[in-house]
Amino acid sequence: MLVSLEEKLITHSGVRIFFKNNNWEIVNLFNKSVLRVDYKVCIVLITFMNGHSIESSYREINNYFKLDRSDFNELVKTLKDKELIVDENNDSHIWTKEIINSWDHYGWRKAADFHLLTYDYPFLDYRDGGRESDIDIMKSYSDMEPDKNRGKKYPANKIQREIKTPKPVDILKELNISFDLNKAHSLSGLDPEKVSKLMSLCFGVLRRRKVSNSEKREDLVRKISPSGGSRHPSEGYLFNTSIDSLDKGIYHFSSISSTLDYIGDLPDEKTLSNLFPGPSRANFKTEAFIVITSLFERNMYRYREPRTFRTIYMDIGHIVENIHQICKHMGINSFQHQGIDDAKVEQLLDVNYLEEGAIIGIAIGGNNE
């Protein structure tokens, strides 16, 4: 194949260059290819990143090292064959570049790379026997590893005391009488009864559904918020700063026992204020913060594909809106914000961020400032 020296080429926008384990690697996110190369190939790709003719690229490369013309032409041909350098009007290059530029506008560069790697993942199509396939898949998973993770309970030596909360089904009977999404009740102070109902209603188990007679699979749980596959990866915590008649401290709502479990003391005021810079912007007097985390394994057990991480935010989004609407009904202010010091929060909750991550904080309070 003859190479036109004036042909203008550009490094594909999906190309990434990494130095790992004393080796250079070229990754093309678009076609999911990985090549281990020497540094000279990396320099060639870099010279083409802003678009160059083969002739001008060759002259520039010779500023760094000497490369025979025929060897250079052969290298360019190989890089073209592998779609690492392409014509400027190449469709996949333009499409990839548009995604990167639009996502980068919001600071989502790494997320864009992840999307490029996974956009064409072969998900199960439920339109053609998908339901039956899904049942078989879940059975095969449970044969390998029991499917029993339906809730969380801290070890007994971690829990200083438990506060029993009413069950969601009983709270709903009260709400059904006067619950109106379009009507805000007058503000009233927070108290232990209200916050217990709020946490139980938003994180507690409403009912259960049997899916298998096997001892390897627990019944699925249903809550007032929808959750993909009934996995319910979200956990709720309460940082009580000033609710009357409730000890200040950090509480976890356990859906297993339907209790608010006191698991730790609050940090000092300065540390506490730094934990929740976003929720602290609330225009009312904050009496407590609700933190929602995601226990990743619970979701990943069922959904073992690259977009599982997206669904935990959908799960939390439903809970956040439920908290907002229920607070409005109860006469409680609420203000949600993702601006929290997640690493410090996770440390206080004694969780491993790779297993359970803090996602969002919600300020709640009964009185306006």
Image (spheres, rainbow, N blue to C red):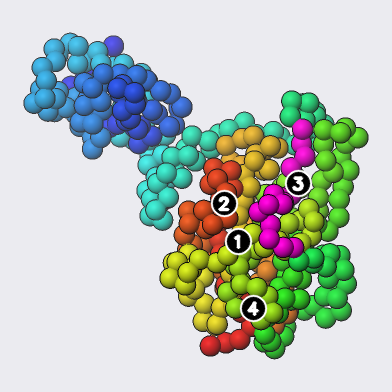
Residue 339 at x, y percent in the picture? 47, 63
Tell me the CA gap for discs 3 and 2.
Answer: 20 Å
Circle nearer the N terminus (2, 1): 1
Q: Nearer the viewer, residue 216 or 347?
A: 347
Q: Which amino acid is tagged 1?
A: Gly
Tell me the CA gap for discs 4 and 3.
Answer: 30 Å
Residue ID for mark 4: 243
Tell me the CA gap for discs 2 and 1.
Answer: 10 Å
Disc 2 crowd, CA 10 A, few/some/many (<14, 14-19, 20+):
some
Q: Which span is picked out in magenta?
A: 146-162
- Kindly state the secondary structure of the residue where label 1 is placed: strand
Tell me the CA gap for discs 2 and 4.
Answer: 24 Å
Residue 228 at x, y percent in the picture? 71, 47
Q: Nearer the viewer, residue 195 or 71?
A: 195
- Kindly state the secondary structure of the residue where label 2 is placed: loop
Marks 3 & 2, CB-CB < 8 Å contact: no
